[in-house]
Image (cartoon, helix red, strand yellow):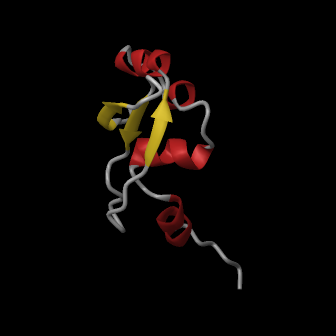
Amino acid sequence: MFTLNNIRKNEELNYLVSSLPCPNCDSTLSVEITPDKLWAYNQGGYAQDVLSAYDEGVRERFITGMCEICWALMFDFDDE
């Protein structure tokens, strides 16, 4: 399951939603979704369906809360 926070309607009749704060750096991310995507979320839809307009980094942000920068720092497997 993933979480959409601070759901609010914008001027284009779409919705702005925010992620949970990153557990490492406390930043949040806001994205825009359409009414049908919000309906899918409320019906238990998966992140890859509801946030299909966004890349896997954005979807991961809404699933785990971890931002892409902190994720990369946490899993930096440089072989040097």
> For residue 35, which quarter of the picture?
top left
Q: Position of residue 28 (x, y in %)?
A: 37, 55
Give above or below for 35 relative to 22: above
Q: Position of residue 37 (x, y in %)?
A: 48, 21
Q: Dividing the image into 4 quarters, which one contains the C terminus?
A: bottom right
- Judge left or right: residue 57 versus residue 5: right
Front-most of 17 and 14? Answer: 14
> For residue 45, which quarter of the picture?
top left
Which residue is drawn at the image coordinates 48% and 25% (left, top)? 46
Which residue is drawn at the image coordinates 47% and 41% (left, top)? 31
Residue at the right extreme, as displayed: 80
Q: Position of residue 77 (x, y in %)?
A: 63, 72
Front-most of 37 and 72? Answer: 37
Residue at the left extreme, as displayed: 6
Which residue is drawn at the image coordinates 32% and 61% (left, top)? 23
Q: Dividing the image into 4 quarters, which one contains the N terminus?
A: top left
Which residue is drawn at the image coordinates 56% and 30% (left, top)? 48
> For residue 10, which quarter of the picture?
top left
